[in-house]
Amino acid sequence: LEFRRVLSVGFMLLIAGFWACQILTPFKGLEYIILFMGTMSGWFSVYDIYDDLISRRVNGSDAVKFAEMTHTSSRCWGVIWACISLFFMTAGVYLALVVLSLNTQ
């Protein structure tokens, strides 16, 4: 418990340091840090969908309920949701990079 608390406080101090550098200097690294954090969060959601719905079956999941309603497989719904998640994550990263490139011009 103490390690997680120290890790969380350290992470907040790191982000605060990047924010201070963003304000006080011409260094613009905060946008890339936030883009990295968002991308990693998106990849974790895709992994979680794969782990819960494609590689193994969780009986209480939404995919099982959809499979019962549509008479398909819960893995089919897992693949559909993973594709949707990948699409939106890719679109988000692309648009973020476009906005970042517009800000640097």
Image: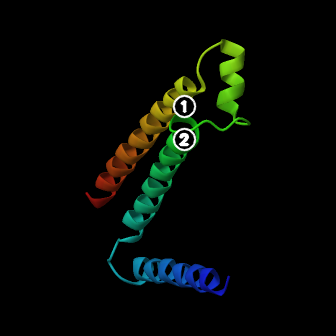
Could you tell me which residue is drawn at 53 percent across and 44 percent down? 51
Q: Are marks 2 and 1 in contact (CB under 8 Å)?
A: yes
Q: Position of residue 8 (x, y in %)?
A: 59, 79
Q: Name the residue under label 1.
A: 78
Q: In the structure shown, which secondary structural element does the residue marked by tag 2 occupy?
A: helix
Determine crowd level at label 1: few under 14, some 14-19, many 20+ residues with C-alpha closer than 10 A.
many
Q: Position of residue 31 (x, y in %)?
A: 40, 64
User: Which picture quadrant has residue 7?
Assistant: bottom right
Q: Mark number for residue 49? A: 2
Q: Mark number for residue 14? A: none
Could you tell me which residue is drawn at 45 percent across and 63 percent down? 34
Could you tell me which residue is drawn at 50 percent across and 55 percent down? 41
Q: Position of residue 23 (x, y in %)?
A: 44, 79
Does 99 appear above or below 53? below
Under mark 2, the amino acid is Ile
Could you tell me which residue is drawn at 40 percent across and 61 percent down? 36
- What whole-number distance in Å separates the C-alpha atoms at marks 2 and 1? 6 Å
Q: In the structure shown, which secondary structural element does the residue marked by tag 1 occupy?
A: helix
